[in-house]
Image (cartoon, helix red, strand yellow):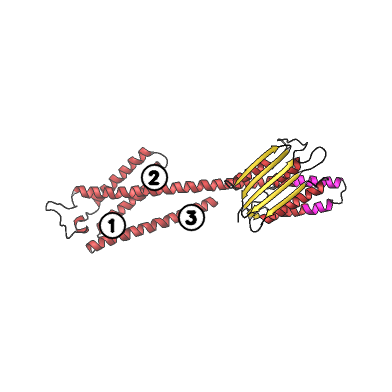
């Protein structure tokens, strides 16, 4: 429906442009003839009307039916026939305009004695052919440009709709994925009859409120996204017994910067998923540095005893990589390293302001 409305608006704009161009063309032409002759001869009206008909036959029919469908030979044959018919109509049916009296007469340079004037047959045939050919070429150029412009806009529209659909799909995947993991965290607290379980439920409600009412926007305030990350770490600390090595440091001036929602959480979630060793020790260190509209994200976690199962690892990192490609093309750099029993994610991102 949106594409149809845009095409309708484009057609109205194209029609308006043509009306203006023809109005200017006629005004200039008739003024020139009037200033040279003192009158507006009717034969010229028929001559111009023939050219306009040839223009629109080519513009509305020949180019779409032949040239745009790559029937080049048929197109050139059709144009030749169109020009021949136009000249025949001009020569046989229309009254003959007196070109000699309608063209400007140079006063200082009189024509030679043997000059026969423009009323000879060569001029009467050559000028209509040239005039109609110019209109056909102009019409073809305009139609080809408009077709190219329409296809370019349509392709961009399709790509945008595809990107939006993919982003919507990825975001919808992310929310249940996060919710299941958070519920597992709360379940572990309730199974241990921990006094911190109620606080975990309240923290989860804050997280879900953010995801339902703010994360559905194209952009969110960076400070809100960082608060969401802090609440997520708070929930994880409640679940983890040995949480002294779970840290989050935010540096820099967080003011009016904006970021795409739920962009960092997959990296952090992945860190907690695999950041506990067989002794129950957890190491997750997150550093976020904000420098004007640049964000530097560094997340390091211990590689624990849980093995990564590609078939059951959820969307996780792959989701975030795809979102980064769609949302921040040429505006981010992502580096993932694994060394010394540590897993590191380094992300540099250009923020919106």
- Neighbour tally class for label 2: few under 14, some 14-19, many 20 plus, Cα within 10 Å: many
Q: Secondary structure at mark 1?
A: helix
Q: Is residue 194 magenta?
A: yes
**Residue 55, placed above or below residue 38:** above
Q: Which residue is mark 2?
A: 63
Question: Residue at 40% across / 48% down in the picture?
Answer: 143
- Neighbour tally class for label 1: few under 14, some 14-19, many 20 plus, Cα within 10 Å: some
Comparing 273 with 160, the one in front is: 273
Q: Is residue 350 magenta?
A: no
Disc 1 from disc 3: Cα separation:
32 Å
Q: Secondary structure at mark 2?
A: helix
Task: First in sequence, mark 1 or 2: give its number.
Answer: 1
Write down the region rendered in magenta. 179-203
Q: Quadrant of the C terminus?
A: bottom right
**Residue 72, placed above or below residue 212:** above
Q: Nearer the viewer, mark 1 or mark 2?
A: 2
- Quadrant in which residue 217 is drawn: bottom right
Q: Is residue 141 left or right of residue 307?
A: left
Farthest residue in the front direction?
340
Q: In x, y percent, where is residue 342?
A: 73, 39
Q: Which mark is residue 9?
A: 3
């Amino acid at each position: 429906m949106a594409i149809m409305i845009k095409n309708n608006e484009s057609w109205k704009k194209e029609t308006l442009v043509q009306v203006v161009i023809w109005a200017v063309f006629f005004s200039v032409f008739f003024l020139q003839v009037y200033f040279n002759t003192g009158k507006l001869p009717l034969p010229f009206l028929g001559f111009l009307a023939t050219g306009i008909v040839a223009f629109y036959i080519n513009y509305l029919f020949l180019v779409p039916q032949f040239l745009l469908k790559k029937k080049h030979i048929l197109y050139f044959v059709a144009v030749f026939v169109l020009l021949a018919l136009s000249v025949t109509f001009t020569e046989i049916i229309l009254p003959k305009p007196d070109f000699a009296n309608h063209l400007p007469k140079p006063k200082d340079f009189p024509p030679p004695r043997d000059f026969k004037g423009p009323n000879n047959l060569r001029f009467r045939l050559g000028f209509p052919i040239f005039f109609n050919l110019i209109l056909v070429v102009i019409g073809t150029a305009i139609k080809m440009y408009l077709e190219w412009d329409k296809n370019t806009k349509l392709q961009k529209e399709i790509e945008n709709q595809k990107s939006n659909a993919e982003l919507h799909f990825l975001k919808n995947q992310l929310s249940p994925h996060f919710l299941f993991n958070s519920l597992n965290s709360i379940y572990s607290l309730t199974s241990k009859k921990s006094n911190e379980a109620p606080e975990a439920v309240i923290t989860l409600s804050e997280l879900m409120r953010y995801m339902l009412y703010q994360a559905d926007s194209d952009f969110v305030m960076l400070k809100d996204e960082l608060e969401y990350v802090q609440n997520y770490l708070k929930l994880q600390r409640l679940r983890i017994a040995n949480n002294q090595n779970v840290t989050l440091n935010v540096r820099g001036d967080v003011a009016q910067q904006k970021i795409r929602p739920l962009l960092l959480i997959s990296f952090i979630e992945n860190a907690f998923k695999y950041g506990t060793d067989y002794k129950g020790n957890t190491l997750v260190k997150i550093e976020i540095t904000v420098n004007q509209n640049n964000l530097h994200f560094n997340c390091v976690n211990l590689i624990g005893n849980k093995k990564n199962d590609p078939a059951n690892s959820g969307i996780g990192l792959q989701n975030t990589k795809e979102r980064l490609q769609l949302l921040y093309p040429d505006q981010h750099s992502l580096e993932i390293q694994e060394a010394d029993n540590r897993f590191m994610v380094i992300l540099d991102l250009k923020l919106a302001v």
